[in-house]
Amino acid sequence: MARETLRDRILARVATALGLEPTVVPRGTPELAPLLLPAMMERFDLDRTALASNNPDLAHMLEERCRACAVKGLCFESLARGVTADAAAGFCPNASIFTVLRPRKAS
């Protein structure tokens, strides 16, 4: 049996906080990034295609950060379960940028 790492313990706590099973979440692969990024952007009411058209450098940076992310497994499972933008902010490396880009709600 593999020894539990600090990363495994952190991911288990994050998963529990999100209401997911506290299992060891696999790292995922860089190939998941093209699927996860648009889905996560939708959670923040952002359109990846429009962003890529208007600011390709920013879009590329977001893609690179997603590709390098160490919690793609958690991201995939969270998105599948309907994670909210507020909950995703706890683990997504792009969340702070998404929050700034997010359309303001009319009051």
Image: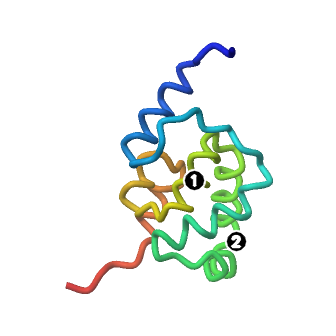
Along the horizontal axis of the image, is 39 left or right of 53?
left
Query: Seen from this angle, which residue lies furthest left?
Result: 107
Q: Quadrant of the C terminus?
A: bottom left
The spot of residue 56 in percent (x, y) is 70, 71
> Is residue 98 positioned above or below 51 on the image?
above
The spot of residue 51 in percent (x, y) is 61, 76
Query: Seen from this angle, which residue lies furthest bottom?
Result: 106
Image point 63% across, 13% down: which residue? 3
Identify the residue position indicated by label 1 in the image: 77
Image point 53% across, 73% down: which residue? 42
Label of residue 21 in the image: none
Between 85 and 9, the one lying in front of the other is 9
The spot of residue 54 in percent (x, y) is 63, 80
Identify the residue position indicated by label 2 in the image: 56
Along the horizontal axis of the image, is 34 left or right of 103?
right
Q: Quadrant of the N terminus?
A: top right
The spot of residue 21 in percent (x, y) is 48, 42
Image point 58% across, 18% down: which residue? 5
- Rounded to the nearest angstrom, the CA distance separating label 2 from label 1 is 28 Å
At label 2, the amino acid type is Pro
